[in-house]
Image: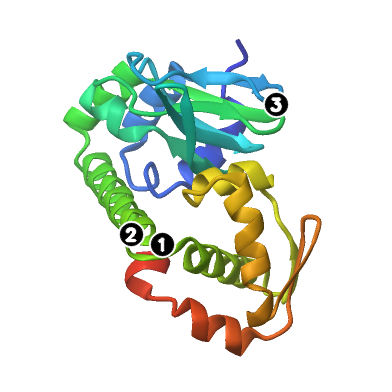
Amino acid sequence: MPNAEPYRQEVRDLALFADMEDSSFEALMRGSYVQNFPPRIDLITEGETPDFLHIVISGSVDLFSSWNGRETSLATVRPVSTFILAATIKNAPYLMSARTLEKSRIILLPSEDVRAVFDTDNAFARAIVTELSQCYRAVVKNTKNLKLRTSLERLANYLLRQRGRTQSDAFDLTTEKRRLASFLGMTPENLSRAFKGLEPYGVKVTGNHIEITDLKDLTGFANPSPLIDDHSS
């Protein structure tokens, strides 16, 4: 397997690794390697032991879960970021599975090395606590979104977040509609009806292309809240 040395600075720049001791960072990078994966390849399976902490350098990864013949999408991981930190630190089974959505380059850090450095490097330990706290808050916000909002409200707020990300009233969905429906807690049929239900609020849909023609009306209906929709804090 190729060593991850060429991506050293990209890893070092992540908040998780930025303040740790040089010797600790060297210890992590020595056992790391990088691997290229084609689309739709399973990387980890829920219930398995966490052998590695993964860092997405390019591409994107779907975090999902399955039960009793059903499957749901939980999150998308994009560069440059890690997954799944909690299982690595706790040395507990993965609660989610992961697969590539497109051709992706992933760095793998042995979980045993991550835990060893966690025990000895205070700055790294603090960074891990901060990242896990951020993940916990994101889970709470997502739970509130699913439990307090109707499917129409969830879709409206999702579109407003995509508009904010693209800084444009016209944009293409980067997620296939079936997967988007799963992420928003809907069936594909309900998602299709929800798009139609947002037409009176200024949402025009053509295939995967979205155009928001009345931002004020859509925002008034969605009623976004920083305590649900702001994932930066």
Residue 141 is marked as 2
User: Which numbered disc flags the more N-terminal residue, 1 or 2?
Assistant: 2
Residue type at mark 2 is: Lys
* Mark 2 surroundings within 10 Å by alpha-carbon count, few (fewer than 14), some (14 through 19), many (20 or more): some
* Mark 1 surroundings within 10 Å by alpha-carbon count, few (fewer than 14), some (14 through 19), many (20 or more): some
In this rendering, position of residue 183 left or right of residue 88? right
Q: Position of residue 116 (x, y in %)?
A: 24, 22
Query: In whole angstroms, how far apart are the C-alphas of marks 2 and 3?
Result: 29 Å
Q: Is residue 226 above or below residue 99?
A: below
* Mark 3 surroundings within 10 Å by alpha-carbon count, few (fewer than 14), some (14 through 19), many (20 or more): some
Q: Helix, strand, or loop for circle 1? A: loop
CB under 8 Å between discs 1 and 2: yes
Q: Which residue is mark 1?
A: 231
Q: Which residue is mark 3?
A: 39
Q: Position of residue 223 (x, y in %)?
A: 44, 80
Query: In whole angstroms, how far apart are the C-alphas of marks 3 and 1?
Result: 27 Å
User: Quick one: quadrant of the C terminus?
Assistant: bottom left
Residue type at mark 3 is: Pro
Q: Helix, strand, or loop for circle 3? A: loop
